[in-house]
Image (spheres, rainbow, N blue to C red):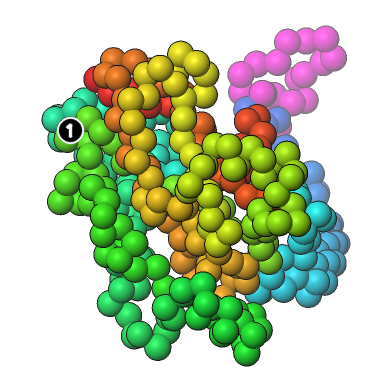
Amino acid sequence: MAADDDYHPGQKKSLGQKCSDFGRSIWNGEKHEFIGRTGSSWAKIGLFYLIFYSCLAGFFAVMLVGFFSTLDDSEPTQQGMYSLIKSNPGMGFRPMPDVESTLIRFKAGDPKSYAEHIESIEKLLKPYKEQEDADENTYFNCSDAYRQEKCEKEKPCPVCGFNLTEKFATSNCTKENYYGYNEGKPCILLKVNKVFGWQPVACNASNTGTEMCESAKKILGDRMNPNYIGVTCDGENEGDADNVLNVTITPNLGFSFAYYPYYNKPHYLPPLVFVQMNVRKGALIQVWCKLWIENIKHHKNDKAGSSHFELLVD
């Protein structure tokens, strides 16, 4: 205290005086203040913020409950033309070991270079293999006629099982064949993105003259079928197309109508298509896979009705 009494304005404080002032700012014994506030002051401001944040949290909780009460666990609020994708599904593909890249690159005959690709495909196929071992009463044999009959009696339509052994019986795209990666002929697994309530519209006598159906007829040829969504995978540009030697699609007709519409029913698994591509080694190829049906439009930028990836076989 003597040091403080000796202090005069304009005089430089000593280190001891500075330490004393700092300690007094934390606890002032004369005024019984902690960091500038008395006990009662701290109690009042603490009570104020407790009430304030409690009311804020309660208001947020009420708004959150109100928001979730408008949602349905089984179907989206925005559907059809009111949804972001406007009932125009895209198409996913595997392998995709890196979600930030669409490049499929490997060296033929080098297991280390394509180990992640096989793992990516197997991960997607796992629930399908588990489905084959499930109770037969859980799933239905979804031939077109059978599903149509069931849909007339049950709303929504029953869940269809997708038997990998049956669907890919004629395909070389199997785990035993390393999905073609050991030979430099990679298999790409395709699936249509799930859109609630979307129903494919076939090209028939009433709409066969539309631009989409005319293009589908020209490109698919004898693979065009009114009960299937046609699929093609080609080089995006002329240079890419020249480096694609051969493409094999299984099932050959594409995605069966029997699995649509999608209603988010338990145990539902979308149909799959394997595309095996024989390409020129050492060439970076941009591949554009498209869906062909009356009510799907293609757009490369947002991948509407299609899927885009790059393929490089070293």
> Residue at point 70% right, 15% down?
13
Closest to the observer, 143 or 22: 143
Q: Which residue is mark 1?
A: 183
Q: Quadrant of residue 197?
A: bottom right
Q: Is residue 70 above or below residue 275?
A: below
Image coordinates of residue 79 in percent, x first then y, are: 76, 61
**With 3 as the anchor, is 220 left or right in this view?**
left
Q: Quadrant of residue 216?
A: top right
Q: Secondary structure at mark 1?
A: loop
**Three-letter amino acid code at the position of disc 1:** Glu
- Magenta residues, as a range? 1-18
Say if the magenta span includes residue 3. Answer: yes
> Residue at point 44% right, 18% down?
240
Image coordinates of residue 164 in percent, x first then y, are: 31, 63
Image coordinates of residue 87 in percent, x first then y, are: 72, 53
> Residue at point 43% right, 26% down?
310
Image coordinates of residue 223 in percent, x first then y, are: 47, 48
Q: Is residue 238 above or below residue 256?
A: above
The quarter of the rendered structure image containing the N terminus is: top right
Closest to the observer, 269 or 116: 269
